[in-house]
Image (spheres, rainbow, N blue to C red):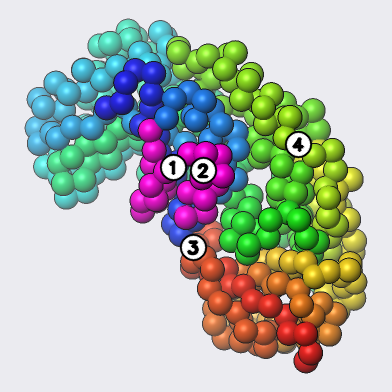
Amino acid sequence: MPSPEEYSLFAITAPGLEPLAQAELRAMGIRAAAEPGGVAWTGGADDLYAANLRLRTASRVTALAAEFRARTFFELERHARKVPWERWVPRGGAVRLRVTSKKSKLYHEGAIAQRVLEAIEHRVGPLAAGGVVADEEGGEEQGDAQLFIVRFVRDACTIRADASGALLHLRGYRQALARAPLRETLAASMLLGSGWDGASPLLDPMCGSGTIPIEGALIARRIPPGLASPDREPRDYTFTSWPDFDVERWAKVVDRACEDILPASPVPILGSDRDDGAIEAAASNAARAGVADDVDLSVRPISAIEPPPGPGCIVINPPYGVRVGERDPLRNLYAALGRTLRAGAPGWTLALLSPDHALERQVGIPLDEAVRTSNGGIPVRLVVGQVPETS
Ligand SMILES: C[S@@+](CC[C@H](N)C(=O)[O-])C[C@H]1O[C@@H](n2cnc3c(N)ncnc32)[C@H](O)[C@@H]1O
């Protein structure tokens, strides 16, 4: 275990996004190791605070609370009572546990949770509330309860304290929804995975509720996702209620991030969609993120796009159509997208979130896989290529 001033940190990502989170941390001066499901490193409170505030591609940041082996409840109790729970749980606080067990002698997740809750109370006194939560990473709010993620794999137990609270994709701005909105973390991953760096024009001609152009504006203006609001006040994070939370240090991390913010996007950022309700939602979301003046939103079909002088980057999350009967119209839509781009945006980079090779081929532009992940349970790939100069 690291020293008491340090944390063994792990930023959880959706599968396939680990290298992007690792690159984000590298840009912050942090060397982290990519592991399946996230990135790991040891750092102090500055790292913990900055990672929560600034990581665009991670779902949550956690700190290691304990690692031990236990094959009996007696061993589990003995180790769990030695964990310094008071580092994360204030007196009279509330706790939630997410327990999973694989290939281990101790397999009853409810019984494991009960022993861990008893160990916490043994050290910090009675809890306001304790509960066991589902295994799945939902988008749910968790109130003030401190979440611990308890994992048994082959009798090795790892306990991590969640530092983020609500999942990090919940930046706070996206309250108006259109159909099939992208998670903000996936939209940011598409942008970073496409190689777009905020220094050339960006266009999403199927922008729906505006997630890609809004995340683009945040990147271009160097606004951390945790400050995506008009007043640039940080969203809530669980670590701010940890007993050792250092309010001055946190203020410094936030101030430093604010100093980097550009007053306006240095490049044009355009979003359009044929659905006027979607564009209305996108406009109100952009206003809530404090980037209304940085994104140019319009109602238009893909056939009527007018890219600004480029080249720049076109980042698109087209409809998937997983239901029967949707394949033929979709094939036509992907083919029309390719024709429009070849005619109107030669030399631009195209980055597309693709559900399958067959649809992708309809676009008629050579595309290479940059990221492989899943979106709402559907396996998807981010494919990137260059629109040919001549058709
Ligand atoms: C999967 S959704 C995009 C969701 C978006 N990324 C978000 O986060 O809300 C696909 C979008 O493509 C739009 N669309 C479908 N066909 C279109 C066309 N021919 N021209 C313009 N937009 C189109 C739909 O209205 C829908 O908003």
Which residue is pictured at 49% across the width and 66% down the height?
372
**According to the image, label 3 marks what residue?**
373
Q: Is residue 317 left or right of residue 114?
A: right
Residue 261: image tag: 4
Residue extent of the magenta highlight? 19-42
Whether ligand 1 has any atom under 8 Å from the Cβ at mark 1 is answered as no
Between the C-alphas of marks 3 and 2, the distance is: 20 Å
Which residue is pictured at 28% across the width and 40% down the height?
151
Q: Decide: few, some or many residues near mark 1? Use Cα within 10 Å; few <14, some 14-19, many ≥20.
A: some
Q: Is residue 297 left or right of residue 316?
A: right
Q: Decide: few, some or many residues near mark 2? Use Cα within 10 Å; few <14, some 14-19, many ≥20.
A: many
Looking at the rendered image, the disc whose residue lies closer to the viewer, 1 or 4, is 1
Which residue is pictured at 67% across the width and 66% down the height?
317
Res 54 → quadrant? top right
Image vertical order of residue 202 relative to residue 64, above or below: below
Between the C-alphas of marks 4 and 2, the distance is: 18 Å
**According to the image, label 2 marks what residue?**
25
